[in-house]
Amino acid sequence: MSAAKENTKSINRSLLTVVLLLLVVVIWVGIRLAFPDSSTIVAGSRPDNLGIREGKLITCPTTPNCVSSQSTDVEHTIAPLTYKSSATDALANLKSIIQSQERAKIIAETDNYIYAEFASRWMGFVDDVEFYANKATGKIDVRSASRLGESDLGVNRQRVESIRELLNAI
């Protein structure tokens, strides 16, 4: 076979690969647009170890895709949320803020705790976010962690800071 024919075959295979990848992307985007609240294969499983134990939320993993106001290391630490009202009113306001967020769902709540899931729009990655109104400190401890992956590109930290701004504005 001549070099020209071999080169043409190679180009055709490359073009076919690109077309197939584009087709997969178009199908994925179509599915996410048609079913934005549906679970995806990258959602991961809901953790069974969340909640408050002896006044503490679970610690962040070693990966950089988690922030916690109870963390002591620089990479994972974030300030707790503050409030000027009662803890009950602050959690009610927080619940309202969470319910106003796209792709957010409250999974569990008590008189001093809220656990919510936040899903990313296009890929459907899920982050687990917990809020604990610590009446002893007068603050709301928070933990936000990605279920899968290594990096979250700062999404968990940005989410907590956005919620902080909305809570402070009330």
Image: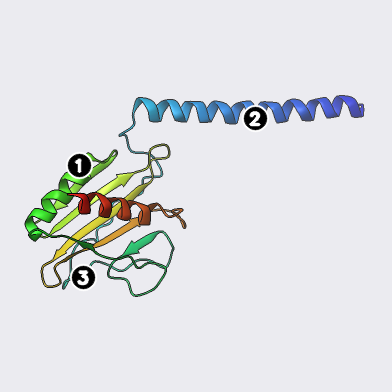
- The nearer-to-camera label among 1 and 2 is 1
Q: Are marks 1 and 3 in contact (CB under 8 Å)?
A: no
Residue 23: tell me if it is visible.
yes
Q: Position of residue 133 (x, y in %)?
A: 14, 63
Check disc 2 and report the residue beneath it. 18
Check disc 1 and report the residue beneath it. 99
Nearer to us in this view, 70 or 161: 161
Check disc 3 and report the residue beneath it. 56
Q: Amino acid at mark 1?
A: Gln
Label 2 crowding class (10 Å Cα cut-off): few <14, some 14-19, many 20+? few
- Residue 138 horizontal side relative to residue 120, left or right: left
Q: Position of residue 167 (x, y in %)?
A: 21, 52
Q: Earlier in the sequence, mark 1 or mark 2?
A: 2
Q: Secondary structure at mark 3?
A: loop
What's the colour scheme?
A: rainbow
Q: Position of residue 54 (x, y in %)?
A: 16, 73
- The nearer-to-camera label among 1 and 3 is 1
- Tell me the number on the disc at residue 43: none
Nearer to us in this view, 147 or 114: 114
- Label 1, label 2: how many angstroms apart (C-alpha)? 40 Å
Q: Are marks 2 and 3 in contact (CB under 8 Å)?
A: no
Q: Earlier in the sequence, mark 2 or mark 3?
A: 2
- Snapshot quadrant of residue 59: bottom left
Q: Secondary structure at mark 1?
A: helix
Image quadrant for the N terminus?
A: top right
- The nearer-to-camera label among 2 and 3 is 3
Q: Residue at x 21, y 70 (%)?
A: 56
